[in-house]
Image (spheres, grey):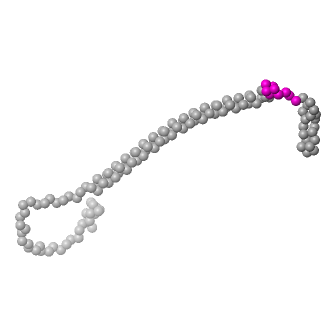
Amino acid sequence: MSTAYAFDPVRRPLPARPVEAAPVLAPAPPTTATAPRALPLARPKVLAASVVLAGVVCVVVAQLLLSIATAGSAYRLAALQQRSDVLAHQQQVAAEALAEDAAPQRLAARAKALGMVPDDSPAYLDAVTGRVLGSTAR
């Protein structure tokens, strides 16, 4: 086994070819300018780098947009909570006013202001028999 595998395991030595006699050719006519050998273009590396860069830019832009949307939602949530607190306070004040107006003393005073008088002899109707209990005469 050769030591080429130890140094570069990807590169393997080529098998030996039998040496043949080279055919004798006439010398090529001299040319004035030789065209340089075209080098392979580096487009695959540039393309890969541009794709990676575009991906990073897209991720950064998406992160910024999400942060902006989250911040806007947080401000809106704070405003709605403040409005909810104000409405809850108004509801509590209205409930207290209603309870105060529904007190028996208030109802009697309002009825007297409207000209109503209390009934001294109330009469009741028995739903089972249909009879009137109490006095209906004034």
Q: In the image, 35: left or right of 101?
A: left
Q: In the image, 131: left or right of 62?
A: right
Q: In the image, 124: left or right of 45?
A: right
- Residue at the (51%, 36%) spot, across then down: 75
- The reply to whether residue 105 is visible in this rendering is no
Quarter of the rendering containing residue 13? bottom left
Q: Main secondary structure of the magenta part?
A: loop
Query: Residue 117: percent from the left, percent from the top?
Result: 85, 27
Query: Residue 22: percent from the left, percent from the top?
Result: 11, 73
Quarter of the rendering containing residue 30? bottom left
- Residue at the (76%, 30%) spot, across then down: 102
Which quadrant is home to the C terminus?
Answer: top right
- The reply to whether residue 81 is visible in this rendering is yes
Specify start and end residues of the magenta stretch as a single range. Answer: 111-119
Q: Does residue 117 belong to the magenta stretch? A: yes
User: In the image, is residue 25 above or below residue 86?
Assistant: below
- Residue at the (23%, 70%) spot, across then down: 15
- Residue at the (14%, 74%) spot, across then down: 20
Q: Does residue 113 belong to the magenta stretch? A: yes
User: In the image, is residue 12 above or below residue 61?
Assistant: below
Total numbered badges shown on the rendered structure: 0
Query: Residue 18: percent from the left, percent from the top?
Result: 18, 74
Which quadrant is home to the N terminus?
Answer: bottom left
